[in-house]
Image (tube, rainbow, N blue to C red):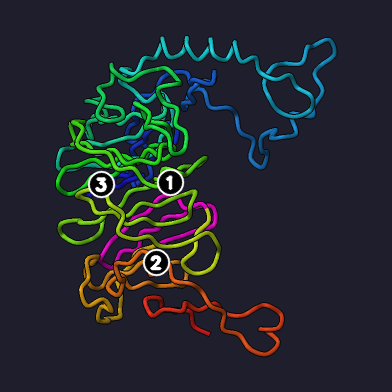
Amino acid sequence: MDIDSKGFAYLGQNTVRKYDTKTGKLVGAIEHSPETEGGGTFQTEANLPNHVPGQGGQGPVVGFIPPPPGAARGGGGGRGGRGAPDPAAQAAARAAFRAKYPPTTPMIVGGIEEIRVDEAANEVYVADNYLNGRIMVFDLTTLKFKRGWGARGHELPDISTSDEAHAYKPNGPQPPEFAGHLTFNFSDDGLVYAADRVANRIDVTDKQGNFKAEFILAPYTGVGGATGGVAFSPDKAQKFLFISDLTNNHIWFLNRADGKVVGQLGSMGESGGQFFGLLPVSVCSGSCRPTARGARSSISCRASRRRRKSQNPNPTFQIPRRTTLGFGSWDLDLTSWPPLPARLSPPLRRRASGRRAASGRGRWREATRPWTDTRRP
């Protein structure tokens, strides 16, 4: 989702729809292929199923419903003894679909992973997850297709439809194409940072798709991937990248110039400064409060009311004053961060007494000063 300065909202699910937030009316939608790779039909207002208020779908119960008398059990996985899908038939159907809708298809074919509005160029950028990811650019006014590219700036005709070209194994070589779950963001100086989560990498191109660099992050990460979302430090030069890590439950801090890791924050858990399934990330330095969430995680960035001197006498990792990251009721003042990765994820200690200590309950407090517990009794 993104919103332009005129108040139009661009919402993505199976395609991108533009709404007038003042009236709630649909203004337009980016064209989508009439069918999907899994064999389904793209739903429009004309073919939406009838909905009875108060009545949901069949859900998992349908797997236990016996077929009508004389009817053979259908294919497809699921419950209730239904037959498993035929791999050869699936591969043939997939090949036929990709031949019908090649990588050059000038519309959304898969689902939407990311939307970013570039008002200066009157364009909207979309991450279409067809073929594990395509960056697609559309006109902001007409919503017509303009250009697109794949991994490492591959032009659309050069994107491979072979599954092998998109496959990645931890600590293995990078695939020539995106491996899956593509998100992106673009910097103020016109560079596009595409996070290929399954392949644990960030591809850097300009806004025309010309390849510039590739940053590898936590290549040992397996299922789920490490590069979930991209944000920039709020300084004028946007010196650092903030990368949310779904699988390792970190926020990584990278030098934007060379992609080197300068620190990390967080670990798996549900206490302050911990994450579980962290997905997108957003940063600001004003009074706004954007929020990113995972399965049981949230991180927001808001203006700080505290002013403290940096504890690092020779800082190499500096964020402008009055910038904080908040985790639920926990605030972290970025101005006090040391550059050492070990201190960016400080150990926790438990401060409890009496019965609460004996019962294993108590309030967790951070052992180092960069953290401040803002919860009120």
SS at circle 2 = helix
118 left or right of 202 in image: left
Q: CA distance from mark 3 to mark 2?
A: 39 Å
Q: Is residue 259 above or below residue 131?
A: below
Tell me where the magenta segment starts and ends, as one range: 277-299
The stretch drawn in magenta includes residue 203: no
Q: Amino acid at mark 1?
A: Ala
Corner quadrant of residue 288: bottom left
Q: Which mark is residue 342?
A: 2
Q: CA distance from mark 1 to mark 3?
A: 29 Å
Q: Which mark is residue 72?
A: none
**Residue 285 picture quarter:** bottom left
The residue that label 3 is drawn on is 4
Circle 1 sits on which residue? 226
Foreground: disc 1 or disc 3: 1
Q: Main secondary structure of the magenta part?
A: loop
Residue at image location 40% in from the left, 58% down from the top: 291
Q: Amino acid at mark 2?
A: Ala
Sequence-wise first label, 1 or 3: 3
Q: Residue 224: percent from the left, percent from the top?
A: 50, 42
